[in-house]
């Protein structure tokens, strides 16, 4: 009996062992198969390096000869090539330095970087074009192919021939080219929030005219306008220093920057740019979401409703007349004094009310009870008067520190607006508060610079609006009850609101909408898997709320898309724009429930 029991349990143990083994084997097999599927994730800053791609760096014999013939220093050129190779290696990229003789042996999957190739033989030019026609990727820069092997000067003709750009001015003054910033929706940027960068150049930069907004543009310190040439602001179409495009089956990225600018770049910026170039060149698709969920850009028109408080009602009434969304940052003490006016403003649905403190005194480093009164109590008082929740805080004197931030968070605000910032879109601060950057000229400045010349003020407001929205950034117009909202000065706003209503691509948003849409966008993730000429695009909503009309750009530089279909019939996908020349779709998904992934089926064939 004892032997039978032992035999029974041994048999059961063998069965259980086999079952566990099969289960583990099945799980591991599934996991391995899943890992073998290509899976890419577009997030806000992805610095993952594509190690499998080797960048071929051209060391041009023709350029070396040209430099020597003209009494210049070929060693400087050679050293820059070596330093660039070392910087690529340092940031995780593979490379190989090649000569012009090796150009015919490039294949369509290669990436060729031709830095500072001032001179190029006819043999070299033709083979680079052949390489592009096959489907290769070319990165090139400053004064590419200006000379040939006979030292003949061709100016920018080689650049123009490849890119379609047209050189319009020989150079921009060095003192004007001080800063640059990337366009938000661009293969060179993808879903990153662009920051203004310093630009140190010792050479005059050539200016090219393009038919589309460049990927990187020159700007001033406050990111409000392009540089001036001959006392006139450049158009954004003449303000570029980097572009991308297509030649034959290939892709190109051109920079009007000398190689030493790349060598001086911070590693993070350098790595991001080259990663994006590689990913755009090699991936089947790339995704760049709209910065405000369903909007390419945002315009934030706000008023500091303080001195001459009653004129805030005129501002609100004018905005209501034009159906323009605006935000009034009210001084709570004055809101209480003029309670009937405050309640009248609050009745306008298009007018948001935020706090501009309780008494408009200096808050930073004040006693804690004073800080609480100015930040927390001001919100409570405004909510009591208006019957509305208050979302935004604008500190007097645009000053803010950690103590104030803690109180702003404790009070329940979701965003602040303060001093000019070096970034193009709202960013989340340390304590979770969204900062809406000041990217617009204050009406105090207009008063000083133009002595309130109304036509000049309007012209400059429109210039800043078009410049910043063309970069998919937020434009902020900040006015005051005692300045641009005061008496007849408000006619400038009347004309501006009329302009906005005639340009429907421009999107005025309340501060809370800008902040909430920014938060929502940062919690949307894209990744994809592929099999049998079908891309499975997975869009994940990590927000706790449903997203409506999610808009994004889908680049397809390497494939022809045959169809795009949501996985389930209750999801609708709308094509807002299909640009065949620039090879992208602007798409809009009608909804994504909270904490949900929606899959889009994309049938394609390779080019």
Image (cartoon, helix red, strand yellow):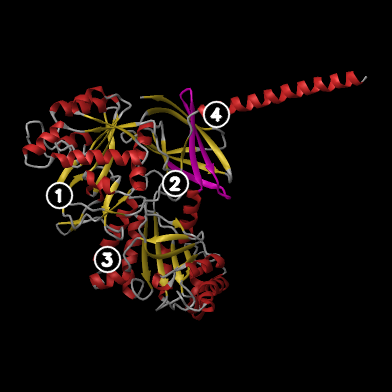
Q: How many marks?
A: 4
Q: CA distance from mark 2 to mark 3?
A: 36 Å
Badge 2 or badge 3: first in the primary sequence: 2
Q: Of circles 4 and 1, which is in front?
A: 4
Specify whether residue 72 is in view.
yes
Image height of 470 relative to 89, above or below: below
Query: Which residue is pictured at 46% across the width and 24% down the height?
Result: 533
Q: Quadrant of the C terminus?
A: top left
Q: CA distance from mark 2 to mark 1?
A: 35 Å
Can residue 549 be found in the magenta stretch?
Answer: yes
The image's mark for residue 457 is 3
Seen as rendered, the residue at the extreme bottom is: 337
Q: Tell me if mark 2 has few (under 14), some (14-19) or many (20+) residues whose alpha carbon lies within 10 angstroms of its own.
A: some
Badge 1 or badge 3: first in the primary sequence: 1
Residue 110, position in %: x, y? 31, 28
Q: Tell me if mark 1 has few (under 14), some (14-19) or many (20+) residues whose alpha carbon lies within 10 angstroms of its own.
A: some
Residue 65, position in %: x, y? 10, 34
């Amino acid at each position: 009996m004892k032997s039978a029991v032992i035999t029974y349990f041994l048999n059961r143990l063998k069965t259980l062992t086999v079952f566990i083994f099969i289960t583990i084997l099945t799980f591991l097999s599934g996991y391995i198969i899943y890992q073998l599927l290509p899976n890419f994730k577009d997030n806000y800053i992805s610095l993952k390096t594509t190690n499998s791609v080797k960048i071929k760096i051209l060391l041009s014999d023709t350029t070396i000869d040209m430099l020597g013939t003209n009494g210049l220093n070929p060693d400087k050129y050679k050293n820059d090539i070596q330093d660039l190779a070392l910087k690529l290696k340092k940031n995780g990229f593979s490379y190989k330095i090649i000569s012009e003789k090796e150009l015919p042996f490039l294949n369509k999957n290669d990436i060729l970087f031709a830095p500072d190739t001032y001179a190029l033989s006819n043999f070299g030019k033709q083979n680079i074009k052949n390489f592009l026609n096959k489907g290769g990727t070319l990165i090139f820069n400053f004064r590419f192919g200006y000379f040939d092997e006979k030292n003949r000067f061709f100016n920018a003709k080689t650049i123009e021939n490849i890119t379609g750009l047209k050189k319009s001015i020989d150079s921009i003054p060095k003192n004007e080219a001080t800063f640059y910033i990337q366009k938000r929706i661009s293969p060179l940027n993808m879903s990153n929030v662009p920051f203004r960068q310093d630009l140190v150049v010792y050479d005059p930069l050539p200016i090219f005219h393009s038919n589309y907004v460049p990927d990187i543009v020159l700007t001033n310190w406050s990111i409000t306008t392009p540089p001036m040439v001959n006392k006139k602001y450049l158009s954004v179409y003449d303000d570029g220093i980097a572009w991308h495009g297509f030649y034959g089956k290939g892709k190109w990225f051109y920079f009007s920057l000398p190689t030493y600018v790349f060598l001086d770049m911070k590693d993070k910026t350098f790595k991001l740019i080259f990663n994006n170039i590689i990913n755009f060149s090699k991936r089947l698709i790339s995704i760049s979401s709209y910065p405000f969920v369903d909007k390419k850009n945002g315009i934030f028109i706000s008023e500091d409703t303080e001195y001459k408080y009653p004129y805030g009602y005129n501002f609100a009434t004018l905005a209501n007349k034009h159906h323009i969304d605006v935000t009034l940052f009210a001084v709570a003490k004055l809101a209480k004094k003029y309670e009937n006016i405050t309640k009248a403003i609050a009745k306008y649905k298009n007018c948001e009310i935020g706090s501009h403190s309780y008494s408009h005194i200096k808050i930073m480093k004040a006693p804690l009870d004073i800080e609480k009164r100015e930040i927390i109590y001001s919100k409570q008082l405004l909510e009591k008067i208006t019957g509305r929740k208050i979302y935004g805080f604008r500190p007097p004197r645009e000053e803010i520190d950690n103590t104030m931030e803690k109180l702003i968070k404790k009070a329940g605000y979701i965003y602040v607006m303060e001093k000019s910032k070096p970034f193009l879109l709202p960013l989340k601060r340390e304590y979770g508060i969204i900062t809406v950057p000041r990217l617009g000229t204050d009406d105090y400045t207009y008063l000083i610079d133009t002595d309130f010349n109304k036509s000049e003020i309007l012209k400059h407001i429109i210039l800043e609006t078009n410049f910043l929205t063309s970069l998919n950034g937020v434009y902020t117009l900040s006015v005051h009850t005692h300045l641009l909202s005061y008496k007849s000065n408000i006619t400038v706003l009347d004309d501006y609101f009329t302009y906005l209503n005639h340009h429907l691509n421009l999107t005025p948003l309340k501060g809370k909408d800008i902040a909430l849409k920014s938060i929502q966008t940062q919690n949307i993730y894209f990744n994809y898997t592929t099999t049998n000429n079908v891309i499975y695009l997975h869009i994940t909503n990590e927000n706790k709320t449903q997203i409506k009309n999610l808009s994004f750009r889908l680049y397809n530089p390497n494939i022809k898309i045959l169809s795009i279909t949501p996985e389930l019939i209750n999801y609708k996908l709308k094509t807002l724009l299909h640009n065949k020349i620039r090879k992208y779709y602007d798409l809009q998904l009608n909804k994504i429930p909270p904490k949900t992934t929606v899959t889009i089926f994309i049938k394609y064939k390779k080019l």
